[in-house]
Image (cartoon, rainbow, N blue to C red):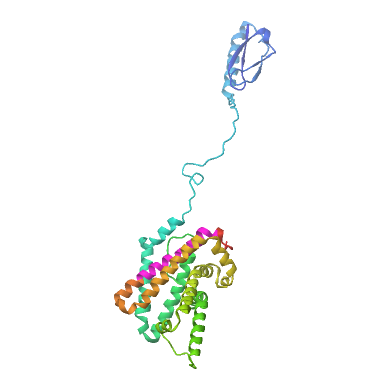
Amino acid sequence: MTIKVSCGMCGKNYKAPDKAAGKRLRCKECGESIKIPEPEVEYGDDDDGFSNLLADAVELESKSKTIRRPVRKPMVKAEKYQGDEDGPVTRKKENNYTKDLMETFLFPLDPANMFTFVMIWVLLCMRDLILPYGGRLGFMGYIIILGWYSNYRFSVIYEATSGRKELPELAPEEGYVIPMLKWAGTWLLVHLPAFLYMGVVIYLLFSNLGDEAVPFLTPEEIVEAMPFFHLGVFVFLYCLGLFFWPILALCVAVGGFETVFRIDLMLLTIWRSKVAYFFTAGGMFLTSVVYTFTAIVALQLGFFGIIIMMAIVLYMEIVALRMIGLYYHHFKKRFAWHWG
């Protein structure tokens, strides 16, 4: 006679001889240890049919309630997550300075930027070609546009420091007078050595000639009166001021006007990012050259020539100002200070 036994975990059925009663066997399916019960006591013929039905019902209920035990798999060493395809981990992190520069040169291709550019162009043409002939009201309008545009130029630098590709909105945020004074103050600070040197040279020159007072001279007459050596020193100091203006304008645009006195930090920053800063300063230098050329030959250009040159100067100025902001955006880790 055999004893029927079922695994309590996976439900697999086994048969064992009577002499194995009370012993244990291991399930081949899940490895569970199963105790072999004692053989069933046989009852009379009257109870045999009922006992078989009862045993079958119990076995069927046991199988229906059995939860199959999951087969354990061997543990393996976890590999380092390499990231999804084209995800932030696997994607190569490149320095996008060159890409941002290209987009800066092509900023008019964006319709919103082009609209902003045209609006500024119209306002500047009104300021320089129409408002000077408007009397007192024209003078007030001239000052308002000059102050607004001074603030806008600082905003161009500030927005570019965050990597933003759109030009700032045209709405004024900080008034007109204070931004205009800040803008003029930055240029005065960088060119102060050159103008002081020129003033001293002219004063000494006319003092040696015996004149009691220095006469009023036009720029052309000053150039003709100054000796070649002193003129060369003046040009050198003036260009040196142009070289330092981008870092000074960046400090004013982001950190406030009080930061202009930390010349030591500015020099250290320029030294840490020499190549990038020379490139940035070159953009502003080229813009200043074109602006000076336009101012000198304005009378020869004519009305429409001046309008075209103003568009060219405006384009170059916006590009140069954005280059200053991108200089901080991409190389701020080399700065001797931070703004958060």
Quadrant of the rendering where the C terminus is positioned = bottom right
Q: Is residue 316 rendered magenta in the image? A: yes
In screen coordinates, is 132 left or right of 230?
A: left
Q: How many marks?
A: 0
Viewer-side residue, 93 vs 172? 93
Residue 168 showing in the rendered view: no
State whether the magenta stretch is mostly helix, strand or loop.
helix
Q: Nearest the camera: 33 or 318?
A: 318
Seen in the picture, residue 216 relative to 128 is either above or below; the reply is below
Residue at the location (55% across, 68% down)? Answer: 255
Q: Where is residue 66 in the image (x, y as percent from the top left)?
A: 59, 23
Q: Is residue 118 above or below residue 86?
A: below
Placement of 310 over or under 166, stated as above or below: below
Residue 105 is situated, as x and y percent measured from the top left of the image, at 39, 61
The N terminus - image quarter: top right
Q: Residue at x 40, y 71 (%)?
A: 289
Q: Nearer the viewer, residue 86 or 51?
A: 86
Asked if residue 121 can be seen in this view, the reply is yes
* Residue 139 place in picture, x, y as percent: 41, 83
Tell me where residue 283 appears, x and y as whole percent. Answer: 43, 66
User: Would residue 329 appear left or right of 220 to someone viewing this image?
Assistant: right
- Position of residue 81 in the picture relative to residue 143 (left or right): right
Residue drawn 48% across the image and 51% down it: 94
| Magenta segment boundaries in residue numbering | 311-332
